């Protein structure tokens, strides 16, 4: 299980939502489930952030 909060803590140096999307794509390998337990607080986080992260994970 991949938790968004763990990804964000592990990669605390990320500065944008787009960087987070790339990390989620990398972290998705080897994980079957993704849990979005927090909302990203980056200035460029879009309204459809959940859909975007789910698509990046798939």
Image (cartoon, rainbow, N blue to C red):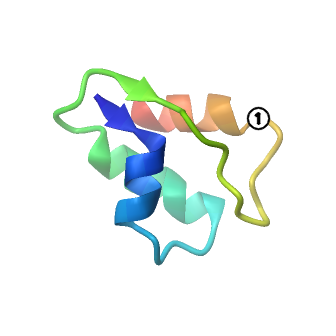
Please report the residue visible at 71 percent of the width from the left and 63 percent of the height from the top.
Answer: 42
Is 8 displayed left or right of 39 in the figure? Answer: left
Q: Position of residue 4 (x, y in %)?
A: 46, 43
Q: Which of 51 and 6 is in front in this view?
A: 6
Please report the residue visible at 52 percent of the width from the left and 29 percent of the height from the top.
Answer: 54
Relative to 1, does residue 40 appear above or below in the rendering?
A: below
Q: Where is residue 15 in the image (x, y as percent from the top left)?
A: 60, 75
Q: Where is residue 39 in the image (x, y as percent from the top left)?
A: 67, 44
Q: Is mark 1 on a helix, strand or loop?
A: loop
Please report the residue visible at 52 percent of the width from the left and 30 percent of the height from the top.
Answer: 55
Q: Quadrant of the C terminus?
A: top left
Residue lying furthest top: 32
Relative to 56, does residue 8 appear above or below in the rendering?
A: below
Q: Nearer the viewer, residue 21 or 1?
A: 1
Q: How crowded is mark 1: few (under 14 residues within 10 Å), some or many (20 or more)?
A: few
Q: Where is residue 22 in the image (x, y as percent from the top left)?
A: 44, 56
| Figure quadrant of residue 1 | top left
| Figure quadrant of residue 51 | top right
Relative to 31, does residue 42 appear above or below in the rendering?
A: below
Residue lying furthest left: 30
Please report the residue visible at 34 percent of the width from the left and 63 percent of the height from the top.
Answer: 10
Is 3 displayed left or right of 26 in the figure? Answer: right
- Which residue is disc 1 drawn over? 48
């Amino acid at each position: 299980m991949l938790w968004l909060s763990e990804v964000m803590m592990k990669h605390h140096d990320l500065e944008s939502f787009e960087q987070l999307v790339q990390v989620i794509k990398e972290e998705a390998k080897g994980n079957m489930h993704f849990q979005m337990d927090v909302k990203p607080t980056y200035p460029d986080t879009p309204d459809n952030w959940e859909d975007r992260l789910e698509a990046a994970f798939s």
